[in-house]
Structures are given as structure tokens and as C-alpha cells.
Amino acid sequence: DSGVTQTPKHLITATGQRVTLRCSPRSGDLSVYWYQQSLDQGLQFLIQYYNGEERAKGNILERFSAQQFPDLHSELNLSSLELGDSALYFCASSPISRRDGAKTQYFGPGTRLLVL
Amino acid sequence: DAKTTQPPSMDCAEGRAANLPCNHSTISGNEYVYWYRQIHSQGPQYIIHGLKNNETNEMASLIITEDRKSSTLILPHATLRDTAVYYCIVRVAGGNQFYFGTGTSLTVIP
């Protein structure tokens, strides 16, 4: 157990709909990352938040957005869903290691999204 | 971004050491090498990381060559539960995100 929680575990919805995925980072971790894993693309970085502010963007579609709240939990919003959005969505959090400055990421169990 | 090259698949006999290689010839001096694994469709699990020196923890050992252009993850006594996809990642300099490649699918054989 990494200490990162994600809800829901599974989500089935229809094309054109909007869904929200939730992530709670490990206690004390300020950074949250979102990744998408589909069968043909592998694990793709989407976006990172640090203490409520967007820090880095990856291959995130304009239909997708995220935010991090004052209690540090994060939500990933996916709108106008398409069949191709079906994937596993992972959240990760990281502390800053005082020992070596590394930013090890700890991943949650993921949300499996199926768009029909 | 620094890229990594790993063999697509490997087999290892149960109880033997599994040695997973990774090439990262374009790595920069301040970039860390990380290893993660993913069992089925579970969340990637952190294994180990290093910068220049060899590292060991309760899960594995990481051997980094002196020129830092390659590394090897060693699982000293592989078990069936070690069957997974193993990812070697180099953290992008100046950035925080990880770029996962295709990894090595390790199968531990009874």
C-alpha cells in the first residue's frame, strides 16, 4: 500500500459525458501527478500540481483539467468523453527527499475508466 | 529528455537472481535513475533509485556504471510474485515528471 488513494476504482460512462476522478496523496506530500495508461500508449504523464498550483503539463488534452485543493487532494476532470479515453488513470504523489533531493513518486491503485 | 532502452522481455528461474539491464546513454549529470514495476494493472510500485553510487534496499540492488550510461536492477532471489513489467526511468532534468517507456516484462518461471 503506497498510501495514495484513488476513487472510484471503476467507472463506466457513455461518450460525451463528464467524469471526475479523485486522488488523495500520501500524508505530507505536496505534489500530485496524474498519468494515463491505455493499451496502445503506455503510461503517459498528464499534469502535476504542487501545493495547489499547476507545476508541469504533459500530454493532457484540452478536454481534461485538474486541480488541487487546500487539503492537497486532487481531482482530474474529463469531459466530452470519447471511446479512446478508456484507460487506467493513475495518481501519484511525492515528497522531497532531504537526503538526496530525489522526488520519488508513489502511485495509487488507479481508476479504470470505460467509455461506451 | 533522457530516454532509456530496455529489453522487451526476460525470463528468470524462481530462486535465481534476475538482472534487468537498462541503457541511458544521454543521461545528464544531475539526473537520477529510477526503477519501478507494475504487476498486472496495478499502480506502478517504486523499487529503487540512484544517482552515481550503487544502491541496495530490501527489494533490490541497483548497479550504475561509472560513466552512468547504463544500469542494472538486480532482484537477488526472484519469486513468482516478481513477475511484472519493470520500468527504468531517468528523471528529466529541471522537470518532475517521469517518462515511462515500454519496460521489460519479467516472467519468473517455477
Image (spheres, coloured by chain):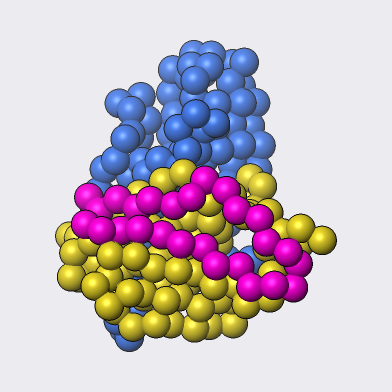
Q: Which color has been applied to chain B in this rendered view?
A: yellow
Quadrant holding the N terminus of chain A = bottom right
Q: Residue at x 71, y 59 (%)?
A: B108
Which of the two residues, A10 or B84, is positioned nearer the viewer here? B84
Which of the two residues, B29 or A97, is positioned nearer the viewer here? B29
* Above-or-below relation of B92 to A36: below
Horizontally, residue B74 falls left or right of residue B24, namely right
Q: Position of residue A27 (x, y in %)?
A: 48, 71
* Above-or-below relation of B95 to A45: below
Quadrant holding the C terminus of chain A = top right
Extent of the magenta region: B1-26
Chain letter, colour blue in render: A
Tell me if residue B67 is in the magenta stretch: no
Horizontally, residue A47 falls left or right of residue B67, namely right
Answer with the quarter of the image where residue A63 lies: top left
Which of the two residues, B82 or B94, is positioned nearer the viewer here? B82
